[in-house]
Image (cartoon, grey):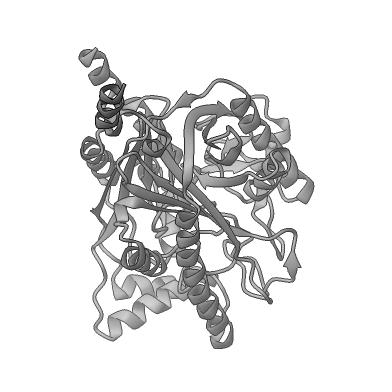
Protein backbone atom coordinates (compact mmCIF):
# COMPACT_ATOMS: atom_id res chain seq x y z
CA UNK A 1 0.00 0.00 0.00
CA UNK A 2 2.83 2.44 0.86
CA UNK A 3 4.43 1.72 -2.51
CA UNK A 4 1.15 2.46 -4.32
CA UNK A 5 0.69 5.73 -2.40
CA UNK A 6 4.26 6.79 -3.13
CA UNK A 7 3.77 5.95 -6.84
CA UNK A 8 0.54 7.96 -6.93
CA UNK A 9 2.23 10.95 -5.31
CA UNK A 10 5.03 10.70 -7.87
CA UNK A 11 2.52 10.87 -10.73
CA UNK A 12 0.22 13.48 -9.17
CA UNK A 13 1.77 16.53 -10.88
CA UNK A 14 0.83 14.92 -14.21
CA UNK A 15 -2.79 14.29 -13.24
CA UNK A 16 -5.43 16.93 -14.05
CA UNK A 17 -6.66 18.88 -11.04
CA UNK A 18 -8.89 21.91 -10.61
CA UNK A 19 -5.73 23.98 -10.02
CA UNK A 20 -4.53 23.01 -13.50
CA UNK A 21 -7.65 24.30 -15.21
CA UNK A 22 -8.74 27.85 -15.89
CA UNK A 23 -8.70 30.49 -13.21
CA UNK A 24 -10.92 33.49 -13.78
CA UNK A 25 -11.52 36.70 -11.88
CA UNK A 26 -14.08 39.40 -12.55
CA UNK A 27 -14.44 42.99 -11.35
CA UNK A 28 -16.41 46.10 -12.27
CA UNK A 29 -16.35 49.80 -11.48
CA UNK A 30 -18.75 52.64 -12.22
CA UNK A 31 -17.20 55.22 -14.53
CA UNK A 32 -20.21 57.54 -14.52
CA UNK A 33 -18.94 61.16 -14.37
CA UNK A 34 -19.77 62.83 -11.06
CA UNK A 35 -20.99 66.08 -12.62
CA UNK A 36 -21.91 67.54 -16.00
CA UNK A 37 -19.43 66.66 -18.73
CA UNK A 38 -19.45 66.90 -22.50
CA UNK A 39 -20.90 63.78 -24.16
CA UNK A 40 -19.21 61.87 -26.98
CA UNK A 41 -20.44 60.84 -30.38
CA UNK A 42 -22.81 63.44 -31.78
CA UNK A 43 -21.71 66.81 -33.14
CA UNK A 44 -25.27 68.15 -32.81
CA UNK A 45 -25.12 68.37 -29.01
CA UNK A 46 -24.89 71.92 -27.71
CA UNK A 47 -24.16 71.51 -24.01
CA UNK A 48 -22.85 69.11 -21.38
CA UNK A 49 -24.72 66.17 -19.80
CA UNK A 50 -27.80 66.64 -17.62
CA UNK A 51 -28.04 63.36 -15.70
CA UNK A 52 -28.15 59.61 -16.21
CA UNK A 53 -30.52 56.86 -17.30
CA UNK A 54 -28.23 54.34 -15.62
CA UNK A 55 -24.60 54.10 -14.57
CA UNK A 56 -21.92 53.35 -17.12
CA UNK A 57 -19.25 50.77 -16.30
CA UNK A 58 -15.79 49.41 -16.92
CA UNK A 59 -15.56 45.66 -16.34
CA UNK A 60 -12.64 43.25 -16.36
CA UNK A 61 -12.42 39.50 -16.96
CA UNK A 62 -9.02 38.20 -15.84
CA UNK A 63 -7.89 34.85 -17.24
CA UNK A 64 -5.18 32.40 -16.23
CA UNK A 65 -4.61 29.11 -18.03
CA UNK A 66 -3.25 25.80 -16.73
CA UNK A 67 0.34 26.93 -17.32
CA UNK A 68 -0.14 30.24 -15.52
CA UNK A 69 -0.32 32.48 -18.60
CA UNK A 70 -2.58 35.45 -17.99
CA UNK A 71 -4.67 37.90 -19.97
CA UNK A 72 -7.44 40.40 -19.30
CA UNK A 73 -10.51 41.48 -21.27
CA UNK A 74 -11.62 44.99 -20.32
CA UNK A 75 -14.99 46.22 -21.59
CA UNK A 76 -16.29 49.77 -21.21
CA UNK A 77 -19.41 51.86 -21.81
CA UNK A 78 -17.45 54.44 -23.80
CA UNK A 79 -17.31 55.77 -27.36
CA UNK A 80 -13.74 54.60 -27.83
CA UNK A 81 -10.23 54.98 -26.42
CA UNK A 82 -7.94 57.41 -28.28
CA UNK A 83 -4.40 56.13 -28.72
CA UNK A 84 -2.78 58.29 -26.02
CA UNK A 85 -5.15 57.08 -23.28
CA UNK A 86 -5.11 53.45 -24.44
CA UNK A 87 -1.31 53.41 -24.56
CA UNK A 88 -1.09 54.88 -21.05
CA UNK A 89 -3.56 52.38 -19.60
CA UNK A 90 -1.73 49.46 -21.16
CA UNK A 91 1.67 50.87 -20.12
CA UNK A 92 0.55 51.03 -16.49
CA UNK A 93 -1.00 47.56 -16.61
CA UNK A 94 2.24 46.17 -18.01
CA UNK A 95 4.29 47.92 -15.33
CA UNK A 96 2.09 46.73 -12.45
CA UNK A 97 0.92 43.30 -13.62
CA UNK A 98 3.53 42.25 -16.23
CA UNK A 99 1.00 41.92 -19.02
CA UNK A 100 2.07 42.81 -22.56
CA UNK A 101 -0.20 44.44 -25.13
CA UNK A 102 -0.88 40.98 -26.51
CA UNK A 103 -2.45 40.02 -23.16
CA UNK A 104 -4.78 43.05 -22.85
CA UNK A 105 -7.98 43.68 -24.77
CA UNK A 106 -9.33 47.19 -24.17
CA UNK A 107 -12.74 47.28 -25.86
CA UNK A 108 -15.34 50.05 -26.01
CA UNK A 109 -19.04 49.49 -26.62
CA UNK A 110 -19.13 52.74 -28.66
CA UNK A 111 -22.13 54.11 -26.79
CA UNK A 112 -22.90 57.65 -27.91
CA UNK A 113 -24.14 58.46 -24.40
CA UNK A 114 -20.78 58.36 -22.65
CA UNK A 115 -18.19 61.09 -21.94
CA UNK A 116 -15.66 62.69 -24.25
CA UNK A 117 -12.11 61.46 -23.56
CA UNK A 118 -8.86 63.39 -23.88
CA UNK A 119 -8.35 65.06 -27.24
CA UNK A 120 -10.58 62.67 -29.18
CA UNK A 121 -12.56 64.05 -32.17
CA UNK A 122 -11.24 67.56 -31.46
CA UNK A 123 -13.13 69.40 -34.20
CA UNK A 124 -16.72 68.28 -33.67
CA UNK A 125 -17.34 69.46 -30.10
CA UNK A 126 -17.68 73.17 -29.22
CA UNK A 127 -15.53 72.80 -26.12
CA UNK A 128 -13.78 75.69 -24.39
CA UNK A 129 -10.70 75.54 -22.14
CA UNK A 130 -12.75 75.05 -18.96
CA UNK A 131 -14.64 72.10 -20.42
CA UNK A 132 -11.42 70.59 -21.76
CA UNK A 133 -9.90 70.78 -18.28
CA UNK A 134 -12.85 68.74 -16.92
CA UNK A 135 -12.47 66.20 -19.72
CA UNK A 136 -8.73 65.83 -19.06
CA UNK A 137 -9.35 65.31 -15.33
CA UNK A 138 -11.98 62.67 -16.05
CA UNK A 139 -9.63 60.91 -18.48
CA UNK A 140 -6.85 60.78 -15.90
CA UNK A 141 -9.24 59.38 -13.29
CA UNK A 142 -10.56 56.83 -15.79
CA UNK A 143 -7.04 55.58 -16.45
CA UNK A 144 -6.50 55.07 -12.72
CA UNK A 145 -9.85 53.30 -12.36
CA UNK A 146 -9.15 50.83 -15.16
CA UNK A 147 -5.68 49.96 -13.88
CA UNK A 148 -7.09 49.38 -10.38
CA UNK A 149 -9.96 47.39 -11.88
CA UNK A 150 -7.48 45.10 -13.60
CA UNK A 151 -5.72 44.41 -10.32
CA UNK A 152 -9.02 43.68 -8.58
CA UNK A 153 -9.96 41.15 -11.27
CA UNK A 154 -6.68 39.28 -10.82
CA UNK A 155 -7.07 39.32 -7.04
CA UNK A 156 -10.41 37.54 -7.57
CA UNK A 157 -8.94 34.64 -9.60
CA UNK A 158 -10.59 31.30 -8.80
CA UNK A 159 -10.93 27.90 -10.50
CA UNK A 160 -13.44 28.13 -13.31
CA UNK A 161 -14.80 26.62 -16.49
CA UNK A 162 -15.06 28.61 -19.73
CA UNK A 163 -17.44 27.75 -22.56
CA UNK A 164 -18.20 29.45 -25.86
CA UNK A 165 -20.86 29.57 -28.57
CA UNK A 166 -22.38 31.96 -31.09
CA UNK A 167 -25.98 33.05 -30.82
CA UNK A 168 -27.96 35.18 -33.27
CA UNK A 169 -30.20 38.25 -33.37
CA UNK A 170 -31.09 40.70 -36.13
CA UNK A 171 -31.95 44.26 -35.19
CA UNK A 172 -28.88 45.72 -36.91
CA UNK A 173 -29.46 47.40 -40.28
CA UNK A 174 -26.76 48.28 -42.81
CA UNK A 175 -27.05 52.06 -42.87
CA UNK A 176 -25.26 52.47 -46.21
CA UNK A 177 -27.83 50.30 -48.01
CA UNK A 178 -31.06 51.23 -46.24
CA UNK A 179 -32.60 54.65 -45.73
CA UNK A 180 -33.64 55.16 -42.11
CA UNK A 181 -36.24 57.73 -43.20
CA UNK A 182 -38.10 55.16 -45.30
CA UNK A 183 -37.39 52.09 -43.19
CA UNK A 184 -41.02 51.56 -42.20
CA UNK A 185 -41.95 51.19 -45.87
CA UNK A 186 -39.11 48.86 -46.76
CA UNK A 187 -40.08 45.23 -47.34
CA UNK A 188 -36.49 44.07 -47.74
CA UNK A 189 -33.39 45.02 -45.72
CA UNK A 190 -30.30 44.88 -47.93
CA UNK A 191 -26.54 45.06 -47.50
CA UNK A 192 -24.00 43.02 -45.52
CA UNK A 193 -24.42 42.45 -41.79
CA UNK A 194 -23.27 40.16 -39.00
CA UNK A 195 -26.09 38.75 -36.86
CA UNK A 196 -23.78 36.70 -34.63
CA UNK A 197 -23.94 37.05 -30.84
CA UNK A 198 -20.62 35.62 -29.56
CA UNK A 199 -20.85 34.39 -25.95
CA UNK A 200 -18.28 33.34 -23.34
CA UNK A 201 -19.75 31.68 -20.24
CA UNK A 202 -17.71 31.46 -17.04
CA UNK A 203 -18.77 29.19 -14.15
CA UNK A 204 -17.04 28.53 -10.85
CA UNK A 205 -16.02 25.18 -9.40
CA UNK A 206 -19.59 24.59 -8.17
CA UNK A 207 -21.17 25.36 -11.54
CA UNK A 208 -22.45 28.82 -10.58
CA UNK A 209 -22.12 31.41 -13.33
CA UNK A 210 -19.56 34.10 -12.52
CA UNK A 211 -19.57 36.05 -15.75
CA UNK A 212 -20.91 36.17 -19.27
CA UNK A 213 -19.05 38.12 -21.96
CA UNK A 214 -21.02 38.71 -25.13
CA UNK A 215 -20.90 40.87 -28.23
CA UNK A 216 -22.80 42.22 -31.19
CA UNK A 217 -21.92 44.22 -34.30
CA UNK A 218 -24.16 47.29 -34.22
CA UNK A 219 -23.78 51.00 -33.45
CA UNK A 220 -25.12 51.98 -29.98
CA UNK A 221 -26.83 55.09 -31.33
CA UNK A 222 -30.41 54.54 -30.25
CA UNK A 223 -30.09 57.43 -27.80
CA UNK A 224 -28.88 60.95 -28.58
CA UNK A 225 -29.98 62.93 -25.53
CA UNK A 226 -28.10 64.36 -22.57
CA UNK A 227 -28.25 61.49 -20.06
CA UNK A 228 -25.47 58.98 -19.45
CA UNK A 229 -26.20 55.42 -20.52
CA UNK A 230 -24.68 52.39 -22.18
CA UNK A 231 -27.44 52.56 -24.82
CA UNK A 232 -28.77 49.14 -25.88
CA UNK A 233 -25.58 47.29 -24.72
CA UNK A 234 -26.03 48.89 -21.29
CA UNK A 235 -29.63 47.69 -21.08
CA UNK A 236 -28.59 44.22 -22.28
CA UNK A 237 -26.01 43.97 -19.48
CA UNK A 238 -28.56 45.17 -16.92
CA UNK A 239 -31.08 42.59 -18.13
CA UNK A 240 -28.61 39.70 -17.96
CA UNK A 241 -27.46 40.65 -14.47
CA UNK A 242 -31.13 40.61 -13.41
CA UNK A 243 -31.68 37.20 -15.01
CA UNK A 244 -28.56 35.74 -13.39
CA UNK A 245 -28.04 37.31 -9.94
CA UNK A 246 -24.40 37.45 -8.91
CA UNK A 247 -23.19 37.27 -12.52
CA UNK A 248 -21.22 40.07 -14.16
CA UNK A 249 -22.24 40.72 -17.77
CA UNK A 250 -19.61 42.25 -20.07
CA UNK A 251 -20.43 43.56 -23.56
CA UNK A 252 -17.87 43.88 -26.37
CA UNK A 253 -18.51 45.68 -29.65
CA UNK A 254 -18.05 43.85 -32.95
CA UNK A 255 -17.57 45.13 -36.49
CA UNK A 256 -20.62 47.37 -36.31
CA UNK A 257 -19.35 50.65 -37.79
CA UNK A 258 -21.80 50.63 -40.70
CA UNK A 259 -24.66 48.96 -38.80
CA UNK A 260 -27.39 50.92 -37.01
CA UNK A 261 -30.23 49.85 -34.71
CA UNK A 262 -33.29 51.00 -36.61
CA UNK A 263 -35.68 52.52 -35.80
CA UNK A 264 -34.16 54.52 -32.94
CA UNK A 265 -34.20 57.73 -30.85
CA UNK A 266 -36.34 56.63 -27.86
CA UNK A 267 -35.48 55.06 -24.50
CA UNK A 268 -38.11 52.30 -24.91
CA UNK A 269 -36.42 51.26 -28.17
CA UNK A 270 -33.01 51.09 -26.42
CA UNK A 271 -34.57 48.92 -23.72
CA UNK A 272 -36.23 46.73 -26.37
CA UNK A 273 -32.98 46.14 -28.26
CA UNK A 274 -31.16 45.47 -24.99
CA UNK A 275 -33.72 42.84 -24.00
CA UNK A 276 -33.61 41.34 -27.50
CA UNK A 277 -29.84 40.97 -27.29
CA UNK A 278 -30.06 39.59 -23.74
CA UNK A 279 -32.62 37.03 -24.93
CA UNK A 280 -30.18 35.85 -27.62
CA UNK A 281 -27.51 35.41 -24.93
CA UNK A 282 -29.96 33.67 -22.58
CA UNK A 283 -30.81 31.16 -25.29
CA UNK A 284 -27.13 30.33 -25.82
CA UNK A 285 -26.53 29.96 -22.06
CA UNK A 286 -29.42 27.49 -21.81
CA UNK A 287 -28.00 25.23 -24.55
CA UNK A 288 -24.92 23.02 -24.66
CA UNK A 289 -21.84 25.16 -25.19
CA UNK A 290 -18.29 24.23 -26.16
CA UNK A 291 -15.95 23.78 -23.16
CA UNK A 292 -12.61 25.48 -23.75
CA UNK A 293 -9.41 23.70 -22.75
CA UNK A 294 -7.31 25.75 -20.28
CA UNK A 295 -4.77 26.84 -22.87
CA UNK A 296 -4.29 30.56 -23.62
CA UNK A 297 -2.30 31.93 -26.55
CA UNK A 298 -2.03 35.62 -27.44
CA UNK A 299 -0.45 37.68 -30.19
CA UNK A 300 -0.38 41.40 -31.02
CA UNK A 301 1.01 43.65 -33.70
CA UNK A 302 0.62 47.14 -35.10
CA UNK A 303 0.61 47.40 -38.89
CA UNK A 304 1.40 50.75 -40.49
CA UNK A 305 -1.56 51.66 -42.70
CA UNK A 306 -0.91 54.26 -45.37
CA UNK A 307 -2.87 57.49 -45.76
CA UNK A 308 -3.51 59.32 -49.01
CA UNK A 309 -1.80 62.65 -49.70
CA UNK A 310 -3.04 65.45 -47.44
CA UNK A 311 -4.75 68.47 -49.01
CA UNK A 312 -2.64 71.47 -49.98
CA UNK A 313 -2.93 74.81 -48.22
CA UNK A 314 -4.86 76.19 -51.18
CA UNK A 315 -7.32 73.30 -51.07
CA UNK A 316 -7.79 73.78 -47.35
CA UNK A 317 -8.32 77.53 -47.79
CA UNK A 318 -11.06 76.79 -50.34
CA UNK A 319 -12.61 74.38 -47.87
CA UNK A 320 -12.68 77.09 -45.20
CA UNK A 321 -14.66 79.30 -47.58
CA UNK A 322 -17.11 76.62 -48.71
CA UNK A 323 -17.84 74.65 -45.52
CA UNK A 324 -19.10 75.25 -42.01
CA UNK A 325 -19.08 73.46 -38.63
CA UNK A 326 -16.48 70.75 -37.96
CA UNK A 327 -15.25 70.63 -41.58
CA UNK A 328 -14.35 74.30 -41.51
CA UNK A 329 -12.78 73.95 -38.07
CA UNK A 330 -10.70 70.99 -39.28
CA UNK A 331 -9.51 72.87 -42.37
CA UNK A 332 -8.46 75.86 -40.26
CA UNK A 333 -6.55 73.58 -37.88
CA UNK A 334 -4.76 71.90 -40.79
CA UNK A 335 -3.78 75.32 -42.18
CA UNK A 336 -2.37 76.30 -38.77
CA UNK A 337 -0.23 73.15 -38.78
CA UNK A 338 1.10 73.97 -42.25
CA UNK A 339 1.87 77.57 -41.28
CA UNK A 340 3.76 76.38 -38.18
CA UNK A 341 5.86 74.07 -40.34
CA UNK A 342 4.38 70.87 -38.92
CA UNK A 343 4.33 67.78 -41.10
CA UNK A 344 1.31 65.55 -41.56
CA UNK A 345 1.46 61.86 -40.75
CA UNK A 346 1.49 59.60 -43.82
CA UNK A 347 0.64 56.34 -42.02
CA UNK A 348 -0.89 55.10 -38.79
CA UNK A 349 0.06 52.18 -36.46
CA UNK A 350 -3.11 50.09 -36.51
CA UNK A 351 -3.53 47.53 -33.65
CA UNK A 352 -4.36 43.90 -34.40
CA UNK A 353 -4.66 41.12 -31.83
CA UNK A 354 -5.50 37.43 -31.65
CA UNK A 355 -6.37 35.33 -28.63
CA UNK A 356 -6.93 31.61 -28.63
CA UNK A 357 -8.80 30.19 -25.62
CA UNK A 358 -8.70 26.44 -26.05
CA UNK A 359 -9.91 26.23 -29.66
CA UNK A 360 -11.87 29.49 -29.56
CA UNK A 361 -10.32 32.21 -31.72
CA UNK A 362 -10.90 35.84 -30.70
CA UNK A 363 -9.72 38.51 -33.13
CA UNK A 364 -9.62 42.19 -32.22
CA UNK A 365 -9.05 45.17 -34.45
CA UNK A 366 -8.85 48.87 -33.71
CA UNK A 367 -10.98 51.67 -35.07
CA UNK A 368 -14.58 51.83 -36.14
CA UNK A 369 -14.56 48.54 -38.01
CA UNK A 370 -17.07 47.99 -40.82
CA UNK A 371 -18.82 44.64 -41.03
CA UNK A 372 -16.92 43.44 -44.12
CA UNK A 373 -13.93 42.63 -41.89
CA UNK A 374 -15.92 40.26 -39.67
CA UNK A 375 -17.42 38.60 -42.74
CA UNK A 376 -14.02 38.08 -44.38
CA UNK A 377 -12.24 36.92 -41.22
CA UNK A 378 -14.98 34.35 -40.63
CA UNK A 379 -14.62 33.18 -44.23
CA UNK A 380 -10.93 32.60 -43.57
CA UNK A 381 -11.01 31.21 -40.01
CA UNK A 382 -14.53 29.81 -39.61
CA UNK A 383 -17.94 31.11 -38.60
CA UNK A 384 -17.32 30.35 -34.92
CA UNK A 385 -14.59 33.05 -34.78
CA UNK A 386 -15.27 35.98 -32.45
CA UNK A 387 -14.45 39.37 -34.02
CA UNK A 388 -14.18 42.62 -32.05
CA UNK A 389 -13.76 46.12 -33.41
CA UNK A 390 -13.24 49.27 -31.30
CA UNK A 391 -10.35 47.62 -29.49
CA UNK A 392 -7.17 49.18 -28.07
CA UNK A 393 -7.33 52.37 -30.21
CA UNK A 394 -10.25 54.06 -31.98
CA UNK A 395 -8.65 56.49 -34.44
CA UNK A 396 -11.33 56.63 -37.16
CA UNK A 397 -13.46 54.34 -39.35
CA UNK A 398 -11.83 51.32 -40.95
CA UNK A 399 -13.57 50.98 -44.33
CA UNK A 400 -13.37 48.09 -46.75
CA UNK A 401 -11.94 48.53 -50.24
CA UNK A 402 -15.49 48.74 -51.59
CA UNK A 403 -16.49 51.48 -49.14
CA UNK A 404 -13.30 53.43 -49.85
CA UNK A 405 -14.17 53.35 -53.53
CA UNK A 406 -17.77 54.39 -52.88
CA UNK A 407 -16.83 57.17 -50.44
CA UNK A 408 -19.50 58.60 -48.17
CA UNK A 409 -19.25 59.05 -44.42
CA UNK A 410 -17.41 55.82 -43.53
CA UNK A 411 -15.04 56.00 -46.50
CA UNK A 412 -14.20 59.68 -46.60
CA UNK A 413 -15.86 62.16 -44.21
CA UNK A 414 -14.98 60.20 -41.05
CA UNK A 415 -11.29 60.98 -41.47
CA UNK A 416 -12.12 64.67 -40.99
CA UNK A 417 -14.44 63.93 -38.07
CA UNK A 418 -11.59 62.15 -36.28
CA UNK A 419 -9.05 64.83 -37.20
CA UNK A 420 -6.80 62.83 -39.52
CA UNK A 421 -5.06 64.80 -42.30
CA UNK A 422 -6.22 62.43 -45.07
CA UNK A 423 -8.23 59.31 -45.85
CA UNK A 424 -6.90 55.76 -45.89
CA UNK A 425 -5.01 54.46 -48.91
CA UNK A 426 -6.78 51.95 -51.14
CA UNK A 427 -4.81 48.94 -49.89
CA UNK A 428 -5.72 49.08 -46.18
CA UNK A 429 -8.13 46.12 -46.27
CA UNK A 430 -5.54 43.88 -47.92
CA UNK A 431 -2.87 45.01 -45.46
CA UNK A 432 -5.11 44.32 -42.47
CA UNK A 433 -6.29 40.89 -43.60
CA UNK A 434 -2.78 39.77 -44.57
CA UNK A 435 -1.41 40.90 -41.21
CA UNK A 436 -4.27 39.13 -39.41
CA UNK A 437 -3.49 35.85 -41.16
CA UNK A 438 0.15 36.07 -40.06
CA UNK A 439 -0.82 37.04 -36.50
CA UNK A 440 -3.25 34.13 -36.26
CA UNK A 441 -0.39 31.76 -37.05
CA UNK A 442 1.56 33.17 -34.10
CA UNK A 443 -1.41 32.49 -31.81
CA UNK A 444 -1.89 28.96 -33.12
CA UNK A 445 -5.19 29.71 -34.89
CA UNK A 446 -5.55 27.54 -37.97
CA UNK A 447 -7.87 27.81 -40.95
CA UNK A 448 -10.71 25.24 -41.13
CA UNK A 449 -9.09 23.42 -44.07
CA UNK A 450 -5.87 23.13 -42.08
CA UNK A 451 -7.75 21.42 -39.25
CA UNK A 452 -9.34 19.02 -41.72
CA UNK A 453 -5.95 18.08 -43.16
CA UNK A 454 -4.58 17.34 -39.70
CA UNK A 455 -7.49 15.00 -39.02
| Residue 358 located left or right of residue 80 | left
**Can see residue 322?**
no
- 301, above or below 288, in the image: below
Instruction: Give the quarter of the figure containing the N terminus.
Output: top left
Q: Is residue 429 left or right of residue 121?
A: left
Depth check: give the residue in front, 413 or 432. 432
Residue 367, percent across and down?
Answer: 41, 53
Does residue 450 appear to the left or right of 173 in the view shown? left
Q: Residue furthest front?
A: 2
Q: Is residue 6 left or right of residue 177?
A: left
Residue at 27%, 40% (x, y): give it. 436
Decide if residue 416 is in sight here.
yes
* Closer to the camera in the image, 401 or 16: 16
300 or 259, which is in the foreground?
300
Which residue is at a point 66% across and 52% down the rendered structure image? Answer: 231
Residue 179, quarter of the rendered image: top right
Res 339 → quadrant: bottom left
Q: Quadrant of the C terminus?
A: top left
User: Dividing the picture into quarters, in which one does residue 437 lie?
Assistant: top left
Tally the marks: 0
In the rendered image, residue 425, in percent from the top left (x then y), is placed at 27, 51
State the image coordinates of residue 439 (x, y, percent, origin top left): 24, 41
Q: Position of residue 303 (x, y in %)?
A: 24, 52
Q: Nearer the viewer, residue 66 or 365?
A: 66
Residue drawn at the location 28% of the way across and 34% of the way down: 13
Amino acid sequence: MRILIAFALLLSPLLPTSAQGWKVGVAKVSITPEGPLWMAGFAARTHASEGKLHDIWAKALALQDAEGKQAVLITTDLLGFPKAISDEIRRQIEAKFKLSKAQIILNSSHTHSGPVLGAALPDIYPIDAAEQKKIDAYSTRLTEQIVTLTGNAFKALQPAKIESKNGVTRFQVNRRNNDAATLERLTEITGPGDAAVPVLKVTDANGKMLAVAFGYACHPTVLDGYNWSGDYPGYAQIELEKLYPGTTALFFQGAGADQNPLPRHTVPLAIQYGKTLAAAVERVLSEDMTPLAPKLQTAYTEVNLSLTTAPTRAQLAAMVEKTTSYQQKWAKRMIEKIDKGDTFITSYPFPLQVWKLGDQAIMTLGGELVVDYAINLKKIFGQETFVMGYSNDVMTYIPSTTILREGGYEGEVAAIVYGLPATWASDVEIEILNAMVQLAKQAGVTKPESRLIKN
